[in-house]
Amino acid sequence: MIAAADFNITKVQRSKLNDINLENIPFGKYFTDHMLEVDYEDGEWKTPEIKPYQPLLIAPSLAALHYGQSIFEGIKAYKNPKGEANVFRPHDNFKRFNISAERMQMPQVPEDIFIEGLRLLIELDKNWIPNQEDHSLYIRPFMFSTDEMIGVRPSDKYKFMIILSPTGPYYNNPMRIYVEEQYVRAVPGGVGYAKAAGNYGAAMYATAEAKKKGYDQVLWTDAFEHKYVQECGTMNVFFIIGDEAITPDLGAGTILAGVTRDSVMETLKDIGLTVKEKSLSIDEIIDAHKSGLLREVFGTGTAATISLIKELRYKEYVMDFDVDLWKIAPEVKSRLNQIRYGLAPDRHNWMFKI
Ligand SMILES: *Cc1c(COP(=O)(O)O)cnc(C)c1O
């Protein structure tokens, strides 16, 4: 058990915050004063360090660069009207991180390092959490292999880190989405359910191709028939069809179990919709659209919370939506934001106080 006293903490001499305007900051560009760093060696985690944010010195033979044992998480902290910092469901990200670690043959990170480290780090850099609407502090825990040796095998050494980035709104404009029929993100038996770095590199080519055609993102479909929908870019996807909210089920291991996805499902139930996790084919979506039952389509994830989809294109069939008329997705987003910013009671116990 690692307690607060067991962290080595070195503070900056002078905060960089004096030089940065926290209004309308771009996503992921600025980092706070401190970071957490801890090494795994000889089968155990060493003393975690919290120290000034700084570059790492790495060997060219660093295993992670060659064979991709590298995983990450994305979490957010918010300020409430009293100026207190709260983190949204970090224990869920902690559990998912270790699921990713297991799949990538990497060591488990103990809760005392992940959660307590995150808490200490945010406490130290609390002034970096912006006060404005739709702003927050993005938390990026990650781990990668650090053996200095070229040979395909699991590394003996690893580094776990947490960095923090103050952030404004992220892809807020309604999106045009291209239903992908050629490239795939995940297959049963693969690593789609893990937040493994390689999944994102592997998706970039297909996304760039969709961008050339004028789309913002792809809607991934299953690898065998390109028929069953999976996720929208790096977000989970929801379809409101009649009085039901439908999102693809996690059964095949091809979908990342989003913490936002889970929170959106709970919130949809709170507002009286029937929520179904099931396999959903593009044909069912088109049928619902033709019969006027397809009401809303949106993506969910920590970075954007909810992103509305204004156009969905499958082959030559284009589904256009007037997102200004939508009620459900904006209501869900507003409810989640109220909880995050401490403006509504946290009935689900989602907020973790720093
Ligand atoms: C991170 C991620 C999501 C969203 O997960 P959240 O926990 O809601 O942020 C969805 N899909 C993919 C592929 C992701 O990497």
Image: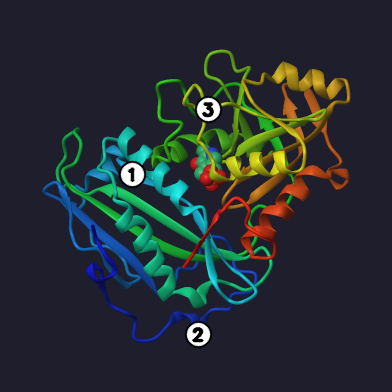
Which amino acid type corresponds to the residue marked 3 in the rendered image?
Answer: Leu
Task: Judge by depth and name the residue closer to the eye, 287 or 220.
Answer: 287
Badge 2: how crowded within 10 Å, few (<14), some, or many (20+)?
few
- Disc 3 marks which residue? 250
**Which structural element holds mark 2?**
helix
Residue shown at 64%/65% (left/top)? 342
Judge: label 1 CB < 8 Å from ligand 1.
no
SS label for mark 3 = loop
* Mark 3 residue's CB less than 8 Å from ligand 1: no
Against 103, residue 120 (above or below) is: below
Q: Which residue is mark 1?
A: 70
Q: Earlier in the sequence, mark 3 or mark 2?
A: 2
From the viewer's perspective, tell me whether residue 264 is left or right of residue 158: right
Residue nearer the viewer, 39 or 321: 39
Q: Count residues near mark 1 (Cα–Cα under 10 Å), then give few for <14, some for 14-19, many for 20+.
A: many
In the image, the residue with mark 2 has its CB under 8 Å from the nearest atom of ligand 1? no
Of residues 202 and 346, the one drawn nearer to the viewer in this rendering: 346
The circle drawn on residue 144 is none
Q: Name the residue type under label 2.
A: Asn
User: What colour scheme was applied to this rendering of the protein?
Assistant: rainbow
How far apart, in angstroms, are the residues tagged by discs 1 and 2?
A: 33 Å
Q: Position of residue 135 (x, y in %)?
A: 62, 65
Residue in the image at 69% along x and 65% along y: 343
Q: Nearer the viewer, residue 103 or 60?
A: 103
Image quadrant where one finds the N terminus: bottom left
Task: Indicate whether 84 appears above or below 242.
Answer: below
| 1 and 2 marks in contact (CB < 8 Å) | no
* Mark 1 or 3, closer to the camera: 3
Horizontal side, residue 189 vs residue 303: left or right: left
Q: Which residue is mark 2?
A: 18
